Image (spheres, rainbow, N blue to C red):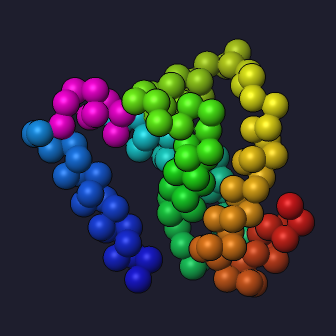
Amino acid sequence: MKALSLIVLTLLTLTACGDSATPEEKAEAEARQWVIEATAEMWRFDFEASDITSVTVEEFATCFVDKAAERSPRSGDSDIWQQAKTNALNPNFEPDDDQQDERYEQIIYECGADLLTAQELVRGGFLGL
């Protein structure tokens, strides 16, 4: 079922980036995918070390970045993903949002509760957040 959801999401993303998409929409979709991939790579070792197999690290990263975007002070901005990518690539970037760390911890917990088994929650340390 989760694999089917990922396929549908991929098809929707590809459809959104078809010939009818503007250059800005294509750039935004590409930046979103970059953010998902970068997030997945950041968590890949921990995911594998915790033997999480019910979802892929990419599915977990997608859950995280989508929920983070929904709760971001920039939610709704037309370039939210391009800005997120720019910030991630800037070694001097410091968020001006005092609530970001707390919000991110909550989102990680929520994605864990939504996507992982009880055993994976324990092995991955999600219950300690």
104 vs 12: above or below: above
The image position of residue 61, as x and y in percent, is: 56, 55
Q: Could you tell whether 129 is left or right of 7 in the image?
A: right
- Is residue 51 at all visible to an observer of this figure? no
Residue occupying the point 15% across, 44% down: 18
| Foreground of the two, 105 or 33 | 105
The magenta region covers 21-29
Q: Could you tell whether 96 is left or right of 7 in the image?
A: right
28 vs 66: above or below: above
Give the prevailing secondary structure in the magenta stretch: helix
The image position of residue 19, as x and y in percent, is: 10, 39
Residue reaching furthest to the right: 128
- Is residue 35 at all visible to an observer of this figure? yes
The part of the image, by quadrant, that contains residue 91 is top right
Residue reaching furthest to the top: 92
Residue occupying the point 81% across, 46% down: 102
The part of the image, by quadrant, that contains residue 71 is top right
56 vs 43: above or below: below
| Foreground of the two, 128 or 40 | 128
The image position of residue 10, as x and y in percent, is: 31, 59
Q: Does the magenta stretch include residue 27?
A: yes
Q: Could you tell whether 88 is left or right of 83 in the image?
A: right
Residue occupying the point 68% across, 19% down: 93
Q: Does the magenta stretch include residue 43?
A: no
The image position of residue 23, as x and y in percent, is: 22, 27
